[in-house]
Amino acid sequence: MVANYPLVKCKFKAAGVHLFISSIIFCILAYLIAFKWYPFPYFTADGGWQGIRIVALIDIVLGPLLTLVIFNPRKTRHEIRFDLGIIALAQISVLTWGVYTVYNERPAAVIHWSGEFYTMPSKSFKAQNISIEKLNQFSEETPPLIHVNLPADPVKLQEILNIVNEKKLAPFEQFQLYHSFKENKDEIFFHQINIDEIISFNKDMKKELRNFLEKTKSNKDDYIYLPLNARYHNVILIFSKEGAIRGALNAPYKIGSV
């Protein structure tokens, strides 16, 4: 009976069913990316949006498109099953690669060093055989906030420089230098930036800050402002004076180039 339907209509029906199933999977993955792997403010600044696009291209474009092209109701049931199996295998394989890549690139820690925060992807710790769970000892935030404190001892400082030169690991990538964020909060907050100077050069950031203050019913001086050097654009992190992240301002420039 199906074979009597117009071929194109059957193809689009099959692709539509595939799209519906793929959309459910995409919604689950999008939730994980936006709220678990790349939570605010790292979604746009550190690759979450790029990850969503990768997953969308594979899941809701590639899979249904393959079904639209390959599916043919005039084939035997065995041939149809074989074709759909190949499509499913191809989509699952590529989707697994895409999800693994996005998951591996997620910010596993946010490191404070030399007056700025830097995001560290999960793959950087895996390359050093460092368990992500070990990072939770430094902070209750997700991802954890960590402070890098360079030793005053010249011998130990030279050891750090040797690691920089030999292993190509910056100080903020070296686990042995990590310290609790909260315990070093006063030192970290000493490096806060002058938010008045920053917003005087950027009308969008000024508006964004005003909206944040109106929404939270607070004053500008209630917070500490520190720069985050992320992969895709910089961010000004807004901290409460107790050390919790309360918000962020998008900064589409490198700190110091204002």
Image (cartoon, rainbow, N blue to C red):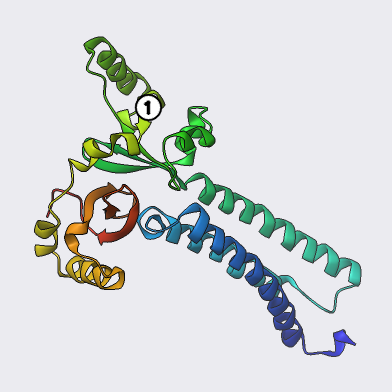
Residue 201 in sight from this viewpoint: no
Residue occupying the point 24% across, 68% down: 213
In which quadrant of the rendered image does the C terminus lie? bottom left
Give the x, y percent position of residue 231.
34, 49
**Direction from residue 84 to residue 51 in the image, left or right:** left
Q: Nearer the viewer, residue 63 or 175?
A: 175
Can the viewer see residue 146? yes
The image position of residue 21, as x and y in percent, is 70, 71
Q: Residue at x 31, y 14 (%)?
A: 159
Q: Which sits in the foreground, 146 or 89? A: 146
Describe residue 61's horizontal placement relative to residue 14 as left or right.
left
Say which quadrant the N terminus sits in: bottom right
Most distant residue in the top direction: 155
Q: Position of residue 139 (x, y in %)?
A: 42, 40
Q: Is residue 61 above or below residue 196?
A: below
In the figure, residue 68 lies in which quadrant? Answer: bottom right
Can you identify the residue that label 1 sits on? 174
Q: Position of residue 146 (x, y in %)?
A: 36, 37
Q: Residue at x 29, y 43 (%)?
A: 117
Number of on-image labels? 1
- 92, above or below 158, in the image: below
- Dot 1 amino acid type: Gln
Q: Nearer the viewer, residue 79 or 161?
A: 161
Question: Image quadrant of residue 119?
Answer: top left
- Left or right placement of residue 252 versus residue 34 in this view: left
Tag 1's secondary structure? Answer: loop
